[in-house]
Amino acid sequence: MDKILIQNLRVQAILGVNAWERATLREVVVNVTLFTDTRRGAQSDDIADCVDYSQVAKEILALVEGTRRFTVEALAEDIARLCLRRPGVQKVAVKVEKPGAVSGAESVGVEIERGN
């Protein structure tokens, strides 16, 4: 299966369980791998036959910016559901990270895989 990658999408969002996390926008980093068959789009060279990763990225940005989730697990699940609604996407891997959330760690997060 072919893969479309959206890497290190940086979004300002409310995400966390602590009171200060609920009041302050923080950076969230999202990585998405969309599993699909790219042969038709490769043959036709027509965006209509492809998964439009630009549109998917815009939808993910809007979702994350508009969501006020407590956990990275819930946010990752939201993103996976959004991606799986796209025609042609058979499976998705989503990684959501919170840079600086744990002292001494560059980032913490979760990575999930979901399929149709």
Image (cartoon, grey):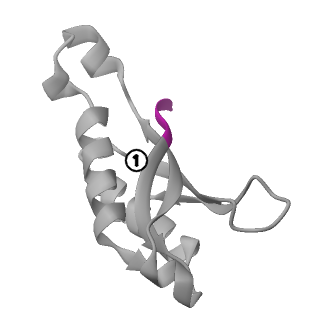
Residue at position x 51%, y 57% from top? 27
Q: Judge from the rendering whether residue 43 lies leftward or rightward of residue 80; answer left or right.
A: left
Quarter of the figure with residue 24? bottom left
The reply to whether residue 67 is visible in this rendering is: yes
Classify 15 as above or below 90.
Answer: below
What quarter of the picture does the C terminus occupy? bottom left
- In the image: residue 36, left or right of residue 41: right
**Residue 38 sits in quarter:** top left
Main SS of the magenta segment? Answer: strand
53 relative to 114 in the view: left or right:
left
- Label tally: 1
Q: Position of residue 108 (x, y in %)?
A: 71, 62
Residue extending farthest bottom: 19
Image coordinates for residue 17, horizontal then vertical, percent: 57, 86
Percent position of residue 103, x then y: 81, 66
Residue range highlighted in magenta: 1-8
User: Which amino acid, by three-letter code, is at mark 1?
Assistant: Gln
Q: Which residue is mark 1?
A: 90
